[in-house]
C-alpha cells in the first residue's frame, strides 16, 4: 500500500468513476484500476462497487475514504507549513548575509574616515548627530564621489549641528547657535564647543554641562579640549576655573569661557 494508491482511491470515490479519476490525475484508467486492486488485495476487502453509471464505495470503502481524505488533508497542510518554514529560513539566511555585507562595508568606511585624520571622538559625535538628525525635508543632495571628501563634509556638518544647551544656575537655556561653517584649520570639536558656550547666558560652561550639550563623555571632553587649547598656545585664566555654581556650594568649577575658546579660532 502506497500513498499513491490512497490518492488514486480517494480520487475514484470523489469523481464516481475510474475514468474521471484518470482524467483528474492525468493517468490511464488501467493505472487507476491497478491502484484500487492493490488496495483491495492487501486489505482483503472489496472497496468499490461497479454500477452501470460508475462506481461507489462499499461500506469498508467509505470508512477508508473518510480516513484517507482526512489524512491527505493533514499531509497537505503539513507540506505547506514545511514549505513556509523553508521560505522563512531562506529569507532569514539572505538577511543575515546582507547584514554581514553591510557590516563589512561600514568597517571599511570607518577605516577610510579615520584615514582622513578624523579622531575616534569626532567620529562618535558625527554618528550620534546623524542618528538623531530629523529626516530630510526634500530630495537628498548629491554625494561627492570618494569617501574622504564625503567624510570631511560630514565633519563640517557635524560642527554646525544645532545643539540644545542645559540651563546653568538661574539663567535660562540659551538659544541654539545658528549654522556656521567651521573656519579652515579649526578642529571641529573646538568650534563646536565655542558655538555652544557663546550661546549660553553666562558666556561660560562647566565641563560636565558642555559634555552633555555635545553628547560626549565628560571624563574625556575636558582633556581633549585642553589638549586642543595647548596646541594653539592658549592658557585658560584662573586655571580653567569658572564662576558656575551648583547647590550653592560657592566653589568654582572647571570649564570654558567664550573668550578663551574664541582666541584659537580667531588666530587659525
Image: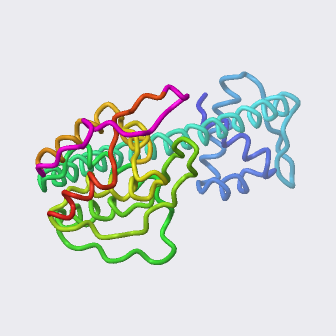
User: What span is in magenta?
Assistant: 232-249
The percent position of residue 140, horizontal first and vertical second, equals 40, 74
Instruction: Classify residue 39 by image quadrant.
Output: top right
- In this orientation, which residue lies closer to the viewer: 19 or 67? 67
The percent position of residue 230, horizontal first and vertical second, equals 13, 44
Relative horizontal placement of residue 231, taking residue 122 as reference (left or right) = left
The percent position of residue 33, horizontal first and vertical second, equals 66, 43
- In this orientation, which residue lies closer to the viewer: 128 or 239? 239
Which quarter shows the C terminus?
bottom left
Identity of the residue drawn at 44% across and 47% down: 213
Identity of the residue drawn at 73% across and 41% down: 10
Q: Is residue 236 magenta?
A: yes
> What is the magenta segment's predominant secondary structure?
loop
Vertical relation: 81 (above or below) 150: above
Vertical relation: 199 (above or below) 247: below
Relative horizontal placement of residue 21, taking residue 46 as reference (left or right) = left
Instruction: Classify residue 143 by image quadrant.
Output: bottom left
Q: Is residue 82 magenta?
A: no
- In this orientation, which residue lies closer to the viewer: 98 or 161? 161
Relative horizontal placement of residue 19, taking residue 236 as reference (left or right) = right
What colour scheme has been applied to the protein in the rendered image? rainbow
Identity of the residue drawn at 59% across and 54% down: 27
- In this orientation, which residue lies closer to the viewer: 245 or 121? 245
Instruction: Classify residue 59 by image quadrant.
Output: top right
The percent position of residue 207, horizontal first and vertical second, equals 36, 38
Identity of the residue drawn at 47% across and 53% down: 132
Amino acid at each position: 500500500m502506497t500513498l499513491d494508491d490512497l490518492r488514486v482511491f480517494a480520487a475514484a470515490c470523489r469523481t464516481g468513476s475510474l475514468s474521471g479519476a484518470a482524467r483528474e490525475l492525468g493517468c490511464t484508467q488501467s493505472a487507476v484500476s491497478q491502484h484500487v486492486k492493490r488496495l483491495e488485495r492487501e486489505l482483503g476487502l472489496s472497496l468499490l462497487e461497479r454500477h452501470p453509471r460508475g462506481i461507489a464505495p462499499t461500506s469498508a470503502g467509505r470508512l477508508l475514504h473518510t480516513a484517507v481524505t482526512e489524512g491527505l488533508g493533514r499531509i497537505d497542510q503539513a507540506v505547506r507549513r514545511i514549505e513556509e518554514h523553508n521560505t522563512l529560513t531562506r529569507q532569514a539566511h539572505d538577511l543575515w548575509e546582507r547584514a554581514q555585507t553591510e557590516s563589512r562595508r561600514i568597517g571599511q568606511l570607518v577605516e577610510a574616515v579615520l584615514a582622513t585624520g578624523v579622531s575616534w571622538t569626532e567620529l562618535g559625535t558625527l554618528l550620534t548627530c546623524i542618528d538623531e538628525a530629523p529626516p530630510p525635508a526634500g530630495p537628498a543632495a548629491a554625494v561627492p564621489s570618494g569617501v574622504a571628501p564625503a567624510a570631511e563634509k560630514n565633519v563640517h556638518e557635524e560642527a554646525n549641528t544645532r545643539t540644545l544647551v542645559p540651563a546653568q544656575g538661574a539663567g535660562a537655556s540659551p538659544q541654539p547657535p545658528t549654522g556656521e561653517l567651521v573656519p579652515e584649520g579649526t578642529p571641529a570639536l573646538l568650534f563646536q564647543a565655542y558655538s555652544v558656550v557663546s550661546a549660553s547666558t553666562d558666556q561660560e560652561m562647566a565641563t560636565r554641562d558642555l559634555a552633555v550639550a555635545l553628547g560626549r563623555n565628560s571624563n574625556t571632553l575636558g582633556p581633549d579640549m585642553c589638549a586642543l587649547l595647548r596646541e594653539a598656545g592658549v592658557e585658560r585664566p584662573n586655571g580653567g576655573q569658572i564662576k558656575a555654581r551648583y547647590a550653592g556650594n560657592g566653589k568654582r568649577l572647571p570649564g570654558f569661557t567664550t573668550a578663551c575658546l574664541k582666541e584659537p579660532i580667531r588666530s587659525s
